[in-house]
Image (cartoon, grey):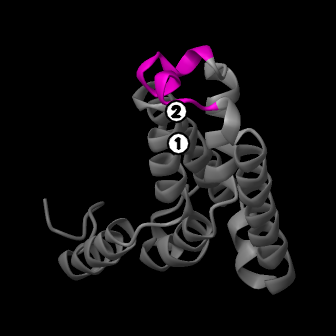
Amino acid sequence: MALNDGMVSTDRFLAFAAMSLLVIVIPGPSVLFVIGRALAHGRRTAVATALGNVFGSYVLVVAVALGVGALVERSAAVFMAVKLAGAAYLVFLGVQAFRHRRDMKVADMAAPAGVARGDVRTVVDGILVGVTNPKGIVFFAAVLPQFVDHSAGGLPA
């Protein structure tokens, strides 16, 4: 089978790998959110938050595959609105953590983190942060499409 028969060309693959590495190495809001949750609530909450972030990223992938990425890519206003929504949600979560900081005691950190906060709510927080993560939106809506071969057909599938 030749390299271009249904496969990605080597130069396109290397460019994509380099861009992906760059995006992965630089921590974004999702990583910082998970680390903050780990420090404040423990490993269980951090894992639930990371799981939510993964689901949020999948939502972005599906949205881009269905064409929403093209809308975000073309409209600076839509992109800015999504970025501001994500920032507002992170600020809201920060204010909540600040308001309830006295509720967190050193003993609570040793206890299972699911006691103070429901796992479902923690996953939902992660999903919301993942969906509104500007870094993920830029990658899936602006960077990833540059490496797609439109002549291969069936992009949403």
**Residue 3 at x, y percent in the picture:** 17, 68
Above or below 76: residue 121 = above
Classify residue 91 by image quadrant.
bottom right
Task: Give, as a three-letter code, the residue at label 1.
Answer: Arg
| Label ID, residue 37 | 1
| Residue at screen point 52% across, 61% down | 153
Residues at marks 1 and 2 touching, judged by CB atoms closer than 8 Å: yes
**Residue 31 at x, y percent in the picture:** 46, 56
**Which residue bears the numbered disc 2?**
41
Task: Check disc 2 and report its element: helix, strand or loop.
Answer: helix
Crowding near the residue tagged with mark 2, few <14, some 14–19, many ≥20 C-alpha atoms within 10 Å: many
Report the side of 101 relative to 18 (left or right).
right
Above or below 75: residue 48 = above
Q: Nearer the viewer, residue 102 or 155?
A: 102
- Residue 106 shown in magenta: yes
| Residue at screen point 68% across, 41% down | 101
| Residue at screen point 66% across, 23% down | 117
**Residue 77 at x, y percent in the picture:** 86, 82
Residue bounds of the magenta highlight: 104-115
Crowding near the residue tagged with mark 1, few <14, some 14–19, many ≥20 C-alpha atoms within 10 Å: many
Classify residue 118 by image quadrant.
top right
Above or below 120: residue 5 = below
Report the side of 20 relative to 3 (left or right).
right
**Residue 39 at x, y percent in the picture:** 45, 43
Report the side of 23 relative to 130 (left or right).
left
